[in-house]
Amino acid sequence: MKTQTEYIEIVQFQLNEGVSDLKILNAEKGMEKHLSKNYQGFIGRQLLRGKDGFWVVILRMKSEQDMHELLNRMKNDNSSEIVNYRKCVNLKEARLEFYYTT
């Protein structure tokens, strides 16, 4: 039985100065809700906190095309959910990796 391939983005980042755990958790909830309503192929996101001050987001999409579209559209998405999330995350030092399930 063949399973559907999922495309996965893993982002490792640190929070911007002064951002609390509660603030990033609330921003993550808003981001997930926004993506599920507005981006085709969105499967889900998971936010993980490490002991070393780093955070990880695992983003899952149905296809590589959906992933590319999401990344391209998010650059110009100025919704309050996206803006609030960007304010929390140190994007300059974030590390992105892409994977797919087999």
Image (cartoon, rainbow, N blue to C red):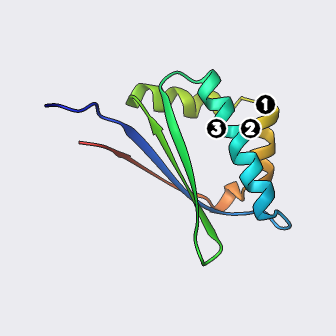
Q: Dividing the image into 4 quarters, which one contains the C terminus?
A: top left
Residue 32's tag is 3
**Residue found farthest to the left:** 1
Residue 78's tag is 1
Q: What amino acid type should be assigned to the residue bearing mark 3?
A: Glu
Q: Secondary structure at mark 1?
A: loop
How far across and how far down the image is residue 81, in percent?
77, 36
Residue tagged 2? 82
From this view, report whether residue 62 is shown above or below residue 10: above
From this view, report whether residue 82 is shown above or below residue 97: above
Identity of the residue drawn at 46% across and 26% down: 66
Q: Are marks 3 and 2 in contact (CB under 8 Å)?
A: no
Q: What amino acid type should be assigned to the residue bearing mark 1?
A: Asn
How far across and how far down the image is residue 19, in percent?
82, 62
Q: Dividing the image into 4 quarters, which one contains the N terminus?
A: top left
Badge 1: how crowded within 10 Å, few (<14), some, or many (20+)?
few
Where on the picture, by quarter, is residue 73? top right
Towards the viewer: 15 or 92: 15
**Does 102 sit left or right of 91 as displayed?**
left
Is label 3 or label 2 in front? 3
Identity of the residue drawn at 46% across and 40% down: 60
CA–CA distance between discs 3 and 2? 10 Å
Q: Secondary structure at mark 2?
A: helix
